[in-house]
Image: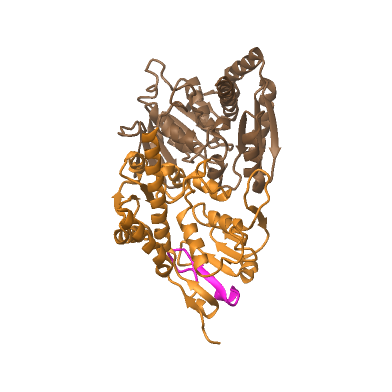
Chain colours: A orange, B brown
Amino acid sequence: MTVSCKTVLASKVSASFREQMKKDIKERNICPKLVGFLANDDPAAKKYAEWTAKTCAETGVAFELRKVDKQDLEEKITEANEEKEVNGIMVYYPVFGGKQDLYLQSCVSTLKDVEGLCHKFVYNVYHNVRYMDESETMKCIIPCTPLACVKILEFVGVYNTVLPYGNRLYGRTITVINRSEIVGRPLAAMLANDGAKVYSVDVNGIQVFTRGSGIKLTAHKVEDIDAKVEDVVPLSDVVITGVPTPKYKMPTTLLKEGVIAINFSSSANFEDDIKSKASIFVPSVGKVTVAMLERNLLRLHDYQNNLLEQKSSN
Amino acid sequence: MTVSCKTVLASKVSASFREQMKKDIKERNICPKLVGFLANDDPAAKKYAEWTAKTCAETGVAFELRKVDKQDLEEKITEANEEKEVNGIMVYYPVFGGKQDLYLQSCVSTLKDVEGLCHKFVYNVYHNVRYMDESETMKCIIPCTPLACVKILEFVGVYNTVLPYGNRLYGRTITVINRSEIVGRPLAAMLANDGAKVYSVDVNGIQVFTRGSGIKLTAHKVEDIDAKVEDVVPLSDVVITGVPTPKYKMPTTLLKEGVIAINFSSSANFEDDIKSKASIFVPSVGKVTVAMLERNLLRLHDYQNNLLEQKSSN
């Protein structure tokens, strides 16, 4: 058997976004400012912060890293919420690691939440609400890492552009190994909202996300199923992993021949021989996530300026 | 040694609130409606639901228990948010058990959140913000169980009414064994905001909550300390336990002579000989929690009606 797997690097996927961003910022002669809060010693968080700094410098975004004690973080976020020159705020999680981090995510002002992790934005993702305001002038911010995964899936041709927008994953089966509140669950919902059948796997079991038919909510449907990873992975056209430990490895033998394999964990979750089975392999997504951060930042920068103009013209 | 511990039952503490509620509802000829969602088989949740039903029936509140599948819960909450005849909504947690429950808490409309668990209310507790609106016509809803603990502490004389309001716990040392986002952490913050020194204990370690001096936030201050339960419990005038398992027992030998011992777990967290050491022992708080739920319900009922009147007069 000839190995014919194509490895797609995040830097390749993010290049066009980065170029567009750079061009926009230069032509419009603006300098959006992003503040990142680092309140832990997590090596993955530090690496992510370094990437953010590097990418921002390249594209013309003013990035300021603020290292703070975790106990001061909430006050520092509140200060940054009020600083006029700050257009976007992000936090390198985990900070406390548990539910308190979810609390912190909603402490970032909606108008500065480049990560898209406050309750309003996550709620809107689940319910397929596309705009922040009733007059539909401000598109919602979508959580960065799930958005990065979607952009990668578009780049590698999983979204079928022949199908109508909003249904371009119809017919696709996707397994997501991670059901965290900040990546796995919103990602599963977004993919289901676009028509996919999604197996969402975590230590507590497996759920199937499909396009829903709720009466009040335009939301995906979720069912618990009595199945194992071994049952659902072989059925999947795409397998996306995000287990935050190098110990976790998705067995290559489970995967369907020609699978598209994407890893968003900072550890390698696929085995070394993944290319013997996959048609496309994306070993990491971090650089696309940073590109999405910048994209969200530019949007929020514009929303803030539009609101200021509206205020001054009233 | 003579045992002279006074046992204070939650029913005793809640009696005056219940009577006041009953009187208000009767005199004003109103019938506030509370909807409770049960989406689990947890025996403690069922018991809590039964108490809610019983207490509501006694006081004149219309209570409707809606048993739903956990996967339908969010849609059902959204429906109830829009039902005009529903004044308050509560959920018997845990549902999913992890961060997803925190997400659900913020799905309940602020104007119907009798439990006070949505992000806005929890945020306001941490920052000592007392009103929902800028014109200070609507007092914030405070999370029920922490509020119940405060009312019990007032009842048993821990709050010193000689001191000014907002400083009535000054000089008191209190240990809280539980730092959950729905009870332990807001409780520690509330007690610190009222002047106490609070040792907040969970499996990850011990933090001290004191009155803070933040510049932007009028919030308590939190510090991690390198201490053990054995170090802080003997220093505490009050020990409040909330460990959700009967296996956890606070050793009576650790407690200070004459301590005030309060247990809000549905399991007994103090040892059988607690009365040999404590001056006051409160074995459970559930009935006070339900009384606080009703109190919050009446407030929200009135806010909703005031807002409707304002709308119709505009």
Q: Which residue lies furthest to the bottom in this view?
A: A1
Looking at the image, which residue is at 63% across and 71% down?
Answer: A234
* Part of the protein shown in magenta: A251-270
Q: In which quarter of the image is residue B93?
A: top right
Left or right: B224 with respect to A140? Answer: left
Residue B255 in view (yes/no): no
**Residue A110, position as x, y percentages in the image:** 44, 43
Left or right: A296 with respect to A161? Answer: left
Looking at the image, which residue is at 51% across and 32% down?
Answer: B143
**Of residues B189 and A62, the one drawn nearer to the viewer in this rendering:** A62
**Residue B107, position as x, y percentages in the image:** 56, 40
**Residue A105, position as x, y percentages in the image:** 44, 46
* Image quadrant containing the C terminus of chain B: top right
**Residue B167, position as x, y percentages in the image:** 37, 22
Magenta span contains residue A252: yes
Residue A168 in view (yes/no): yes
For the stretch drawn in magenta, what is the main secondary structure?
loop
Magenta span contains residue A261: yes
**Of residues A84 and B205, the one drawn nearer to the viewer in this rendering:** A84
Q: In this view, does A223 lie above or below B42?
A: below
Looking at the image, which residue is at 49% across and 48% down?
Answer: A140
